[in-house]
Protein backbone atom coordinates (compact mmCIF):
# COMPACT_ATOMS: atom_id res chain seq x y z
CA UNK A 1 0.00 0.00 0.00
CA UNK A 2 1.52 3.29 -1.14
CA UNK A 3 0.08 6.47 0.31
CA UNK A 4 0.57 9.94 -1.16
CA UNK A 5 0.30 12.83 1.29
CA UNK A 6 -0.09 16.10 -0.58
CA UNK A 7 0.70 19.41 1.12
CA UNK A 8 2.52 20.19 4.35
CA UNK A 9 0.91 23.18 6.04
CA UNK A 10 2.22 23.48 9.61
CA UNK A 11 4.37 20.41 8.88
CA UNK A 12 1.23 18.37 9.62
CA UNK A 13 1.72 15.76 6.93
CA UNK A 14 5.45 15.37 7.55
CA UNK A 15 4.53 14.33 11.10
CA UNK A 16 1.74 12.05 9.90
CA UNK A 17 4.01 10.47 7.28
CA UNK A 18 6.54 9.50 9.95
CA UNK A 19 3.86 7.88 12.08
CA UNK A 20 2.54 5.95 9.07
CA UNK A 21 6.02 4.69 8.29
CA UNK A 22 6.33 3.55 11.91
CA UNK A 23 3.28 1.39 11.16
CA UNK A 24 5.01 -0.02 8.05
CA UNK A 25 2.87 1.96 5.61
CA UNK A 26 4.81 3.16 2.58
CA UNK A 27 3.80 6.81 2.94
CA UNK A 28 5.36 9.61 0.87
CA UNK A 29 5.11 13.37 1.32
CA UNK A 30 4.53 15.59 -1.71
CA UNK A 31 5.42 19.24 -1.22
CA UNK A 32 3.45 21.64 -3.40
CA UNK A 33 4.67 24.90 -4.91
CA UNK A 34 2.65 26.75 -2.26
CA UNK A 35 4.53 25.59 0.85
CA UNK A 36 5.71 28.20 3.35
CA UNK A 37 9.45 28.13 3.99
CA UNK A 38 9.14 27.69 7.77
CA UNK A 39 6.89 24.66 7.29
CA UNK A 40 9.32 22.58 5.25
CA UNK A 41 10.36 19.18 6.64
CA UNK A 42 13.87 20.35 7.52
CA UNK A 43 12.28 22.80 9.97
CA UNK A 44 10.88 19.91 12.01
CA UNK A 45 13.78 17.49 12.26
CA UNK A 46 17.52 17.39 12.81
CA UNK A 47 18.23 14.54 10.40
CA UNK A 48 17.49 13.68 6.78
CA UNK A 49 16.60 9.98 7.04
CA UNK A 50 13.20 10.63 5.45
CA UNK A 51 14.49 12.55 2.42
CA UNK A 52 13.90 9.68 -0.03
CA UNK A 53 10.18 9.74 0.82
CA UNK A 54 9.76 13.47 0.18
CA UNK A 55 9.02 14.78 -3.32
CA UNK A 56 8.63 18.26 -4.77
CA UNK A 57 5.69 19.14 -7.03
CA UNK A 58 5.46 22.13 -9.34
CA UNK A 59 1.74 22.51 -8.69
CA UNK A 60 -0.58 23.01 -5.73
CA UNK A 61 -0.78 26.81 -5.66
CA UNK A 62 -4.14 28.17 -6.88
CA UNK A 63 -2.48 29.90 -9.83
CA UNK A 64 -0.84 26.70 -11.02
CA UNK A 65 -4.26 25.07 -11.25
CA UNK A 66 -4.79 26.86 -14.57
CA UNK A 67 -1.45 25.80 -16.05
CA UNK A 68 -0.70 22.25 -14.92
CA UNK A 69 -2.16 19.50 -17.07
CA UNK A 70 -4.19 16.61 -15.72
CA UNK A 71 -1.64 14.30 -17.34
CA UNK A 72 1.17 15.89 -15.30
CA UNK A 73 -0.77 15.44 -12.05
CA UNK A 74 -1.47 11.78 -12.88
CA UNK A 75 2.18 11.18 -13.75
CA UNK A 76 3.41 12.71 -10.48
CA UNK A 77 1.08 10.52 -8.43
CA UNK A 78 1.39 7.36 -10.49
CA UNK A 79 1.74 4.17 -8.48
CA UNK A 80 0.04 5.45 -5.34
CA UNK A 81 -3.02 3.62 -4.05
CA UNK A 82 -4.44 6.16 -1.60
CA UNK A 83 -4.13 9.91 -1.16
CA UNK A 84 -4.42 12.24 1.81
CA UNK A 85 -4.63 15.92 0.96
CA UNK A 86 -5.01 19.38 2.43
CA UNK A 87 -5.10 22.93 1.13
CA UNK A 88 -5.92 23.18 -2.58
CA UNK A 89 -4.77 19.64 -3.43
CA UNK A 90 -8.34 18.24 -3.74
CA UNK A 91 -9.01 20.52 -6.72
CA UNK A 92 -5.94 19.18 -8.53
CA UNK A 93 -6.94 15.60 -7.82
CA UNK A 94 -10.43 16.23 -9.14
CA UNK A 95 -8.99 17.88 -12.25
CA UNK A 96 -7.19 14.62 -13.00
CA UNK A 97 -10.13 12.39 -12.04
CA UNK A 98 -8.12 10.97 -9.15
CA UNK A 99 -10.38 10.00 -6.23
CA UNK A 100 -10.04 12.30 -3.23
CA UNK A 101 -9.71 9.59 -0.61
CA UNK A 102 -9.16 11.66 2.53
CA UNK A 103 -9.13 15.43 3.00
CA UNK A 104 -7.63 16.83 6.21
CA UNK A 105 -8.29 20.58 6.44
CA UNK A 106 -5.83 22.64 8.42
CA UNK A 107 -8.24 25.53 8.95
CA UNK A 108 -7.64 28.27 6.42
CA UNK A 109 -8.45 25.92 3.57
CA UNK A 110 -12.09 25.78 4.64
CA UNK A 111 -12.40 29.16 6.33
CA UNK A 112 -10.43 31.99 4.78
CA UNK A 113 -10.27 30.69 1.24
CA UNK A 114 -13.44 28.91 0.15
CA UNK A 115 -15.73 31.51 1.73
CA UNK A 116 -13.99 34.82 2.29
CA UNK A 117 -15.43 38.30 2.63
CA UNK A 118 -13.48 41.40 1.62
CA UNK A 119 -14.40 44.91 0.53
CA UNK A 120 -11.33 45.31 -1.68
CA UNK A 121 -12.32 44.74 -5.34
CA UNK A 122 -8.95 43.18 -6.10
CA UNK A 123 -9.15 40.94 -3.06
CA UNK A 124 -12.70 39.97 -3.92
CA UNK A 125 -11.65 38.87 -7.41
CA UNK A 126 -8.72 36.84 -6.05
CA UNK A 127 -10.85 35.22 -3.35
CA UNK A 128 -13.61 34.45 -5.82
CA UNK A 129 -11.06 32.57 -7.94
CA UNK A 130 -9.70 30.72 -4.93
CA UNK A 131 -13.20 29.86 -3.75
CA UNK A 132 -14.02 28.53 -7.21
CA UNK A 133 -10.91 26.32 -7.19
CA UNK A 134 -11.57 24.95 -3.72
CA UNK A 135 -15.16 24.12 -4.60
CA UNK A 136 -13.77 22.04 -7.45
CA UNK A 137 -12.29 19.56 -5.00
CA UNK A 138 -13.48 19.56 -1.38
CA UNK A 139 -17.13 18.62 -2.17
CA UNK A 140 -15.87 15.37 -3.72
CA UNK A 141 -13.75 14.12 -0.81
CA UNK A 142 -14.76 10.65 0.37
CA UNK A 143 -13.56 11.17 3.94
CA UNK A 144 -12.94 14.40 5.83
CA UNK A 145 -10.98 14.11 9.04
CA UNK A 146 -11.54 16.94 11.50
CA UNK A 147 -12.29 16.72 15.21
CA UNK A 148 -15.42 18.38 16.56
CA UNK A 149 -14.70 22.07 16.66
CA UNK A 150 -16.49 25.40 17.06
CA UNK A 151 -19.57 26.37 15.08
CA UNK A 152 -17.59 28.74 12.85
CA UNK A 153 -15.72 25.86 11.23
CA UNK A 154 -18.48 23.27 11.42
CA UNK A 155 -20.84 25.49 9.42
CA UNK A 156 -18.22 26.21 6.77
CA UNK A 157 -17.33 22.55 6.35
CA UNK A 158 -20.95 21.54 5.94
CA UNK A 159 -21.44 24.17 3.25
CA UNK A 160 -18.53 22.72 1.28
CA UNK A 161 -19.24 19.01 1.58
CA UNK A 162 -22.53 17.71 2.94
CA UNK A 163 -22.13 14.08 1.87
CA UNK A 164 -18.68 13.17 3.20
CA UNK A 165 -17.83 10.49 5.73
CA UNK A 166 -16.68 12.35 8.82
CA UNK A 167 -13.80 11.14 10.93
CA UNK A 168 -13.64 13.08 14.17
CA UNK A 169 -10.20 11.84 15.13
CA UNK A 170 -7.30 14.19 15.67
CA UNK A 171 -4.38 14.57 13.31
CA UNK A 172 -1.09 13.72 15.05
CA UNK A 173 0.43 17.06 14.05
CA UNK A 174 3.61 16.63 16.05
CA UNK A 175 5.91 13.61 15.79
CA UNK A 176 6.50 13.17 19.50
CA UNK A 177 9.62 10.92 19.38
CA UNK A 178 11.48 13.88 17.87
CA UNK A 179 10.97 15.97 21.01
CA UNK A 180 11.35 13.61 23.94
CA UNK A 181 12.21 15.60 27.09
CA UNK A 182 14.95 13.07 27.81
CA UNK A 183 16.76 14.34 24.70
CA UNK A 184 16.65 17.99 25.81
CA UNK A 185 20.43 18.36 26.22
CA UNK A 186 21.00 17.10 22.69
CA UNK A 187 18.25 19.31 21.30
CA UNK A 188 19.77 22.32 23.06
CA UNK A 189 23.11 21.63 21.42
CA UNK A 190 21.52 21.27 17.99
CA UNK A 191 19.46 24.46 18.24
CA UNK A 192 21.14 27.72 17.26
CA UNK A 193 19.17 29.36 20.09
CA UNK A 194 20.21 26.77 22.66
CA UNK A 195 22.62 28.90 24.70
CA UNK A 196 20.29 31.90 24.77
CA UNK A 197 17.31 29.80 25.81
CA UNK A 198 19.25 28.03 28.53
CA UNK A 199 20.40 31.40 29.90
CA UNK A 200 16.83 32.72 30.03
CA UNK A 201 15.74 29.57 31.85
CA UNK A 202 18.51 29.84 34.46
CA UNK A 203 17.67 33.48 35.21
CA UNK A 204 13.97 32.99 35.93
CA UNK A 205 11.64 31.19 38.31
CA UNK A 206 8.76 31.02 35.84
CA UNK A 207 8.91 30.92 32.04
CA UNK A 208 5.76 31.37 29.98
CA UNK A 209 5.71 30.78 26.22
CA UNK A 210 3.22 32.17 23.73
CA UNK A 211 4.28 31.24 20.19
CA UNK A 212 1.02 32.02 18.43
CA UNK A 213 0.86 34.56 15.64
CA UNK A 214 0.18 38.07 16.94
CA UNK A 215 -3.24 38.69 15.48
CA UNK A 216 -5.62 40.59 17.75
CA UNK A 217 -5.62 44.36 17.24
CA UNK A 218 -9.02 45.68 16.07
CA UNK A 219 -10.09 42.14 15.12
CA UNK A 220 -13.67 40.92 15.46
CA UNK A 221 -14.39 38.37 18.16
CA UNK A 222 -15.87 35.97 15.60
CA UNK A 223 -12.70 36.04 13.51
CA UNK A 224 -11.22 32.55 14.03
CA UNK A 225 -7.72 33.99 13.69
CA UNK A 226 -8.19 36.38 16.61
CA UNK A 227 -5.78 35.07 19.25
CA UNK A 228 -6.77 37.43 22.10
CA UNK A 229 -3.10 38.16 22.82
CA UNK A 230 -3.98 41.49 24.45
CA UNK A 231 -5.78 39.61 27.23
CA UNK A 232 -2.65 37.56 27.89
CA UNK A 233 -0.44 40.65 28.02
CA UNK A 234 -2.77 42.46 30.43
CA UNK A 235 -3.25 39.42 32.64
CA UNK A 236 0.49 38.85 32.78
CA UNK A 237 1.09 42.53 33.59
CA UNK A 238 -1.25 42.28 36.56
CA UNK A 239 0.54 39.14 37.73
CA UNK A 240 4.09 40.52 37.60
CA UNK A 241 3.10 43.76 39.32
CA UNK A 242 1.53 41.83 42.20
CA UNK A 243 4.34 39.26 42.45
CA UNK A 244 7.46 41.41 42.32
CA UNK A 245 9.47 38.75 44.18
CA UNK A 246 8.96 36.23 41.35
CA UNK A 247 11.43 36.31 38.49
CA UNK A 248 9.46 35.60 35.34
CA UNK A 249 9.53 36.10 31.60
CA UNK A 250 6.79 35.90 29.00
CA UNK A 251 8.36 34.76 25.73
CA UNK A 252 6.87 35.93 22.43
CA UNK A 253 7.95 35.28 18.86
CA UNK A 254 8.08 38.14 16.35
CA UNK A 255 5.44 36.44 14.29
CA UNK A 256 2.22 37.98 12.96
CA UNK A 257 0.89 41.28 11.66
CA UNK A 258 0.20 42.72 15.12
CA UNK A 259 3.66 42.34 16.68
CA UNK A 260 4.16 46.09 16.88
CA UNK A 261 0.78 46.57 18.57
CA UNK A 262 1.75 43.92 21.13
CA UNK A 263 5.06 45.68 21.76
CA UNK A 264 3.28 49.00 22.24
CA UNK A 265 0.82 47.50 24.71
CA UNK A 266 3.71 45.93 26.65
CA UNK A 267 5.46 49.30 26.75
CA UNK A 268 2.31 51.12 27.85
CA UNK A 269 1.91 48.62 30.69
CA UNK A 270 5.57 49.12 31.67
CA UNK A 271 6.51 45.43 31.60
CA UNK A 272 9.13 45.49 28.82
CA UNK A 273 11.72 44.02 31.19
CA UNK A 274 9.40 41.07 31.85
CA UNK A 275 8.95 40.09 28.19
CA UNK A 276 11.47 38.39 25.91
CA UNK A 277 11.12 38.64 22.14
CA UNK A 278 12.60 35.93 19.96
CA UNK A 279 12.58 35.75 16.15
CA UNK A 280 10.12 33.59 14.25
CA UNK A 281 11.52 30.08 14.61
CA UNK A 282 11.31 26.66 13.07
CA UNK A 283 9.41 24.06 15.08
CA UNK A 284 12.64 22.26 15.99
CA UNK A 285 13.78 25.43 17.79
CA UNK A 286 10.36 26.34 19.20
CA UNK A 287 10.16 22.91 20.81
CA UNK A 288 13.46 23.41 22.60
CA UNK A 289 12.14 26.68 24.02
CA UNK A 290 8.87 24.98 24.95
CA UNK A 291 10.61 22.12 26.75
CA UNK A 292 12.40 24.68 28.93
CA UNK A 293 9.23 26.62 29.81
CA UNK A 294 6.70 26.10 32.60
CA UNK A 295 3.47 27.19 30.88
CA UNK A 296 2.45 27.32 27.22
CA UNK A 297 -0.27 29.71 26.08
CA UNK A 298 -2.92 29.06 23.46
CA UNK A 299 -5.68 31.47 22.43
CA UNK A 300 -8.15 33.53 24.44
CA UNK A 301 -10.94 34.59 22.07
CA UNK A 302 -12.09 31.45 20.26
CA UNK A 303 -12.30 27.95 21.66
CA UNK A 304 -10.07 25.23 20.20
CA UNK A 305 -9.29 21.66 21.21
CA UNK A 306 -6.59 21.05 18.63
CA UNK A 307 -4.00 23.22 16.92
CA UNK A 308 -0.29 23.16 16.26
CA UNK A 309 0.41 25.27 19.35
CA UNK A 310 -1.79 23.16 21.64
CA UNK A 311 -0.41 19.86 20.41
CA UNK A 312 3.17 21.10 20.62
CA UNK A 313 2.49 21.91 24.28
CA UNK A 314 1.01 18.45 24.84
CA UNK A 315 4.01 16.75 23.22
CA UNK A 316 6.30 18.85 25.42
CA UNK A 317 4.37 17.74 28.52
CA UNK A 318 3.53 21.31 29.51
CA UNK A 319 0.36 22.72 31.10
CA UNK A 320 -1.69 24.82 28.68
CA UNK A 321 -3.23 28.21 29.43
CA UNK A 322 -5.99 28.73 26.86
CA UNK A 323 -9.72 29.18 26.33
CA UNK A 324 -12.12 26.27 26.00
CA UNK A 325 -15.85 26.77 25.64
CA UNK A 326 -17.17 23.91 27.75
CA UNK A 327 -20.69 24.42 26.38
CA UNK A 328 -19.59 23.31 22.90
CA UNK A 329 -19.71 19.65 21.96
CA UNK A 330 -16.43 17.96 22.78
CA UNK A 331 -15.12 14.43 23.00
CA UNK A 332 -15.71 12.53 26.23
CA UNK A 333 -11.99 12.19 26.82
CA UNK A 334 -10.15 15.49 26.59
CA UNK A 335 -6.95 16.77 28.15
CA UNK A 336 -7.20 19.26 30.99
CA UNK A 337 -6.14 22.90 30.60
CA UNK A 338 -5.87 26.13 32.56
CA UNK A 339 -9.11 27.49 31.09
CA UNK A 340 -9.06 31.26 30.64
CA UNK A 341 -11.19 33.69 28.66
CA UNK A 342 -10.62 36.93 30.58
CA UNK A 343 -7.74 39.02 31.89
CA UNK A 344 -8.73 38.01 35.42
CA UNK A 345 -8.74 34.31 34.54
CA UNK A 346 -5.23 34.56 33.16
CA UNK A 347 -3.87 36.40 36.20
CA UNK A 348 -5.51 33.90 38.55
CA UNK A 349 -3.96 30.92 36.78
CA UNK A 350 -0.49 32.46 37.03
CA UNK A 351 -1.04 33.04 40.74
CA UNK A 352 -2.27 29.48 41.24
CA UNK A 353 0.72 28.09 39.39
CA UNK A 354 3.02 29.80 41.88
CA UNK A 355 1.09 28.25 44.78
CA UNK A 356 0.88 24.68 43.46
CA UNK A 357 3.34 24.19 40.58
CA UNK A 358 3.37 20.40 40.92
CA UNK A 359 -0.36 20.20 40.16
CA UNK A 360 0.22 21.98 36.88
CA UNK A 361 3.28 19.93 36.04
CA UNK A 362 1.12 16.82 36.43
CA UNK A 363 -1.45 18.40 34.13
CA UNK A 364 1.23 18.74 31.48
CA UNK A 365 2.49 15.18 31.83
CA UNK A 366 -1.07 13.84 31.74
CA UNK A 367 -1.57 15.84 28.54
CA UNK A 368 1.38 14.09 26.92
CA UNK A 369 -0.10 10.69 27.75
CA UNK A 370 -3.45 11.84 26.33
CA UNK A 371 -1.74 12.84 23.09
CA UNK A 372 -0.03 9.48 22.77
CA UNK A 373 -3.18 7.45 23.38
CA UNK A 374 -6.03 9.60 22.03
CA UNK A 375 -4.28 11.28 19.13
CA UNK A 376 -1.48 9.01 17.96
CA UNK A 377 -2.66 5.51 18.87
CA UNK A 378 -6.39 5.90 18.12
CA UNK A 379 -5.94 7.87 14.90
CA UNK A 380 -3.18 5.69 13.53
CA UNK A 381 -4.90 2.40 14.34
CA UNK A 382 -8.10 3.56 12.66
CA UNK A 383 -6.33 4.84 9.54
CA UNK A 384 -4.01 1.85 9.21
CA UNK A 385 -6.93 -0.59 9.51
CA UNK A 386 -8.86 1.40 6.93
CA UNK A 387 -5.88 1.28 4.55
CA UNK A 388 -5.58 -2.50 5.02
CA UNK A 389 -9.29 -2.95 4.27
CA UNK A 390 -9.07 -0.51 1.36
CA UNK A 391 -6.25 -2.51 -0.21
CA UNK A 392 -8.15 -5.77 0.31
CA UNK A 393 -11.27 -4.35 -1.37
CA UNK A 394 -9.14 -3.20 -4.28
CA UNK A 395 -7.60 -6.66 -4.69
CA UNK A 396 -10.99 -8.39 -4.43
CA UNK A 397 -12.39 -6.09 -7.11
CA UNK A 398 -9.81 -7.36 -9.61
CA UNK A 399 -10.66 -11.03 -9.07
Image (cartoon, grey):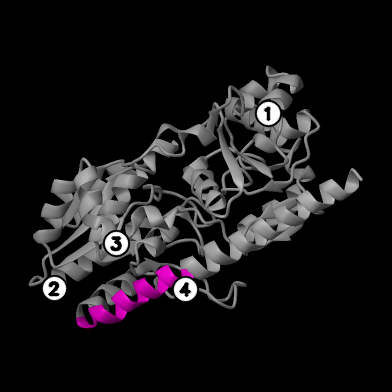
- Who's the residue at 28% across and 66% down the image? 235
Question: Which of disc 1 and disc 3 is earlier in sequence?
Answer: 1
Left or right position of 352 against 148: left
Residue under pointer 2: 243
Q: Is residue 171 magenta?
A: no
Image coords of residue 274 (percent x, y): 15, 57
Mark 2 is surrounded, within 10 Å at the Cα level, by few (under 14), some (14 to 19) or many (20 or more) other residues, namely: some
Q: CA distance from mark 2 to mark 3?
A: 29 Å
Q: CA distance from mark 1 to mark 4?
A: 40 Å
| Labels 4, 2: front one | 4
Q: Secondary structure at mark 3?
A: helix
Question: Which of disc 2 and disc 4 is earlier in sequence?
Answer: 2
- Who's the residue at 52% across and 40% down the image? 8
Q: Is residue 149 visible?
A: no
- Who's the residue at 46% across and 39% down the image? 50
Q: Secondary structure at mark 1?
A: helix
Residue under pointer 3: 181
Magenta residues? 355-370
Determine which quarter of the picture holds residue 119.
top right
Q: CA distance from mark 3 to mark 4?
A: 19 Å
Question: Which of disc 4 and disc 1 is earlier in sequence?
Answer: 1
Q: Residue 335 has which mark? A: 4
Total number of numbered labels?
A: 4
Image coords of residue 149 (percent x, y): 60, 62
Question: Which of disc 1 and disc 2 is earlier in sequence?
Answer: 1
Question: Which of disc 3 and disc 2 is earlier in sequence?
Answer: 3
> Contact, CB < 8 Å: mark 2 with mark 3?
no
Residue under pointer 1: 129
> Contact, CB < 8 Å: mark 4 with mark 2?
no
Amino acid sequence: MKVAMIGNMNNNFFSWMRYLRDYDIDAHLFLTDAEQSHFLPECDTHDNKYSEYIHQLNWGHPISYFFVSSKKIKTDLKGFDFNISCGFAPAFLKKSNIPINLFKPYGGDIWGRPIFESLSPKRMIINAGIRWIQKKGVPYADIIQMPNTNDLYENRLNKLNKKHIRWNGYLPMIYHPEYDINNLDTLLELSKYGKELKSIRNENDVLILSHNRHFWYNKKSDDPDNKGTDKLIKGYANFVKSKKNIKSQLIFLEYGIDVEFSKKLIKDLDIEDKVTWLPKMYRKDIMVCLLLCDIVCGQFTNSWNSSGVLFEALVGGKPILSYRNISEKTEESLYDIMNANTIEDIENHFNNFIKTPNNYKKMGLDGLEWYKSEVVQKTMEKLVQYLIDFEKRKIDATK
